[in-house]
Image: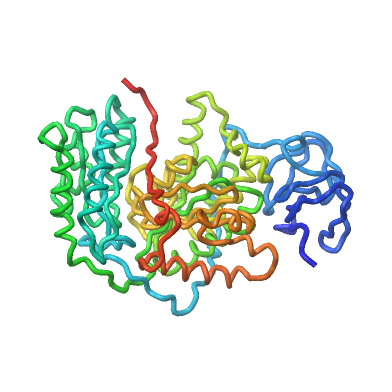
Amino acid sequence: MALESIRIHPADTVVVALEALAKHACITVDGASVTLQDGVPKGHKIAVRSIQRGENIVKYGHVIGHACEAIGQGAWVHSHNMKTNLSDVIEYSYAPVAAHEAEPPVNIPAFAGYRRSDGRVGTRNEIWIINTVGCVNTSAERIAKRANELYRRDNFDGVFAFSHPFGCSQLGDDLEMTQKALAGLMRNPNAGGVLVLGLGCENNQMAQMLALSGMGGSMRIRSFNAQDVADEIEEGVARIGELFELMKDDTRTEVAIAELTLGMKCGGSDGFSGITANPLVGRITDILTRTGGRVMLTEVPEMFGAEQQLMNRAVSEQVYHEIILLINRFKGYFTAHNQPVYENPSPGNKAGGITTLEEKSLGAIQKGGGAPVHQVLSYGEPIHERGMALLNAPGNDGVSATAMTASGATMILFTTGRGTPLGFPVPTLKISTNSALMSNKRNWIDFDAGVLVDGSVTMDMLSGELLTLIIEIASGRVKTKNEINGYKEIALWKEGVTL
């Protein structure tokens, strides 16, 4: 008989419906029968006992909010009878815990990647066009289109332009954020060559961009301002031809999985995200960090309510204090704009069964498995240590995934319960939290984690399958759906005055 609900942790006062359940239906929870007082949508919560008004509600073994009215056993628990406990300021204390990472499999296969001159390894060999300013977006796209018609080779994965609207009429920290992100993209090892295309009169001056990237003297960088040449399309195609020639001897070589840098992302989360896809990705985090690889988590607002767990996994008290600064500065970002720090679950999240930010965050941080936190990165800062890093960026899918790419991610694992076609400059492996999404959107989704709820596979089995797929993608033998569909976009974090 198929399971109707799941209790994630023995201490939980709610279970999650694995299918839509009718009013008066009976479910079995830990051997006891519970009759439903309400119809409950798939992925939503059911009270396993009576909960008093003001009493905390527990899921994942942690508090996710409180009852704003009395809730009877078998009642549907959601926004109508439950509220967040979060407030703007929280006192933290350092209580380090031992990491509980999953053991890596024996004899993990190597992958075939492109070793760069600085030692980093890319999963693709592409030429990226990075614009200093949005004014040249169409020019960059025309250059990429023409170059892809002219330059083809087995060891070459194409020319890609990444449009954005910024770079002009920006000042101070706002301009610096744009520069840091674009400079980070220039350094990504998936780019075997980079053309930096400017206009000439923008605030984001070419010389500043090149200096900030540290790539100004690289043989793999070409740059010019469109105002300085007669035909920018012809000039751009010629410069890309020079890079293409320099890349002719680039070859994939077998390297340890520790040379991967993965960004972990969730978007369009639902009630299954914290049960299936995010814990599955957490297994990959554990495996990669235990073998010396690099993993990034970001979406800082989706740490609110679960941040203490991450703090307790800091490898040192210094890193612990850096996490506090990360969290509190982001809360300050909210309050400076007169916004509540807890107003995060989107309409899609709520429709999928997520009620409060604590609930969303406790599910989201499972992408980090049990790995210790080794470093905290500012926006645009390159990842510089092995292990897991927390990166300062918002929860927005485009902005957070672009930020991880700018910090060096060579692949992104993107879990989703609602689905999205969005993809980023590096291979973006979409993992569905439920099998219905995989069935309905096979043109978007690369891997189905929803099979975990029916008991047909174990977490160990499925993490092995996912690891094999990651190696195949990293080696260029398999393309992700975002690559096949041509969804390779960026979004930059904007804060400040526009002139």
Residue 363 location, x and y as percent?
60, 51
Q: Quadrant of residue 68?
A: top right
Image spot of residue 70 (x, y percent): 84, 37
Q: Nearer the viewer, residue 49 or 464?
A: 464
Residue 3 image offset from top left, x and y in percent: 77, 62
Image quadrant holding the N terminus, namely bottom right
For image coordinates 28% across by 24% down, the residue present is 169
Residue reaching furthest to the front: 149
Side of 243 relative to 280 (left or right): left
On screen, residue 251 versus residue 217, left or right, reads: right
The residue at the point 33 percent across, 46 percent down is 381
Tell me, yes or no, if residue 290 can be seen here.
yes
Direction top: furthest residue: 499
Q: Nearer the viewer, residue 84 or 156?
A: 156
Q: Residue at x 67, y 37 (%)?
A: 85
Q: For the image shown, how many numbered marks are present on the structure? A: 0
Give coordinates of residue 225: x percent, y percent. Answer: 15, 36
Residue 315 appears anywhere in the view: no
What colour scheme does the image use?
rainbow
Quick one: quadrant of the C terminus?
A: top left
- Name the residue at the bottom extreme: 107
